[in-house]
Image (spheres, rainbow, N blue to C red):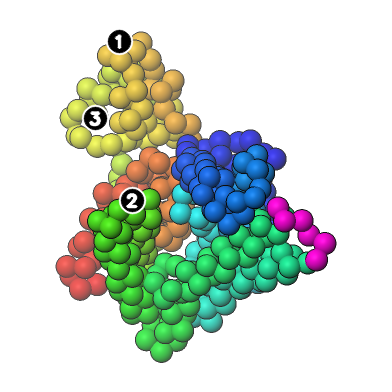
Amino acid sequence: MASSVRTDHIQIARVLGIPIYLHFSWLIVFALIVWTLSTGYFPAHYPDLPASSNWAKGLVASVLFFVSILLHELGHAVVARRHGLRTRSITLFIFGGVAQLERDPKDGRAEFWMAAAGPGVSLVLAGIFYASAVLPFVSASIAAVAKYLAVINLLLAVFNLVPAFPMDGGRLLRGALWGSIGKARATQVASAAGSVFAYFLIVAGVFSLLAGNTLSGVWYVLIGWFIKDASAASYQQVRLDAALRGLSVRDAMVDPVATVSSSGSVAEAAREHFMRTGYGGYPVTRGDATVGLLCLKDVLRLTQEERESTSVQGAMRPLTDAIVIDPDAPLATAIAGMAQAGTGRLVVMQSDRLVGLLTLHGVIRRLKVREELGG
């Protein structure tokens, strides 16, 4: 098991070359499921078994439930690989799991089969667990866990097949419509279906709360809200991809670009650059060479006294591949890199020469002008 940490994610393994992460919210729902199974589900269905047995079954069933979710996501990843798409990571979190692909599939056929793979895996798991539960030599405790996992995998498959984007069913719908009405329109239809389903869950959750079913009501509302936001965000991402198509970094970068010297103090850079212009970052130079990037957040980490005594060299982010982009790179690639770097800007370099600075505000301004001019 790996133990590397990134922000609120913990990498726990690597399967088929894909990093597997746990989001901190997973711990909350895992504990909740263990408690619910151990004190509610198993005692109600198997009252003759001791409490210690119920807690053991609750723990094992919860672990295998999340293993089932991981296998569901790996199903997506395996089919994606067959269609030439790399899966960057799989993250388990409070609402289940998500496989992060490097990009959208190229056509509706790939989208359809990738989406179908996850529910397909869940249905196979449901069959395997059910068959295990009815074997004559299986103990009552094992049969209880296996029956629960058969039911939960069946429900997982059915729930994901609801035609609500970005759930698997919504992606199946988008894949089916893609060829006839195009990706953007298909995404809009699937996203609208996702919003309708999300509001249905929210309303159902409110009625459940009014009826006194607090736990199920809260879950319905949370899941509905999550689907609503995810559906809207997915459609906006498709619109953004369409707007960025054909644009390169060179089309949106700032050129020429102001720089700060690595030898000056952070206080000098704050007074002479940040306070005067309001910009959020500057490339750092040493002689003719570009050596880093100084962002406003790097300045704000220091106290007033520290800014006077710290050089720009000591506070800057060194020039690495994470914050450097080529001027001819696709603008969509640059935005993804910018989000990963968390800087809001990238240094544009060509043959070790500084040629510009790409900022998020600059990209937004470029897209706005393009839209207003009908481009």
Residue at horizontal 40 percent and vertical 44 percent from the top: 346
Secondary structure character of the magenta stretch overall: loop
Residue found at the very far bottom of the displayed protein: 180
Q: Which stretch did the figure color magenta? A: 136-141
Callout count = 3
Q: Which residue is mark 1?
A: 305
Looking at the picture, tell me which residue is in the foreground, 142 or 230: 142
Q: Quadrant of the C terminus?
A: bottom left
Pick whichever of labels 2 and 1 is earlier in the sequence: 2
Q: For the residues carrying marks 1 and 3, which lies nearer the camera in this image?
A: 1
Q: Which quarter of the figure has residue 68?
A: bottom right
Asked whether disc 2 touches disc 1, contact meaning CB atoms under 8 Å apart, the reply is no
Q: CA distance from mark 3 to mark 2?
A: 51 Å
**Amino acid carrying mark 2 in the image:** Thr
Q: Is the residue marked by circle 3 packed among few (<14), some (14-19), or many (20+) residues within 10 Å?
A: some
Q: Is residue 126 magenta?
A: no
Q: Is residue 22 above or below residue 314?
A: below
User: Residue 171's x, y, as percent?
Assistant: 46, 73
Q: Which residue is mark 3?
A: 274
Q: CA distance from mark 2 to mark 1?
A: 53 Å
Looking at the picture, tell me which residue is in the foreground, 311 or 113: 113
Q: Which quarter of the figure has residue 263?
A: top left
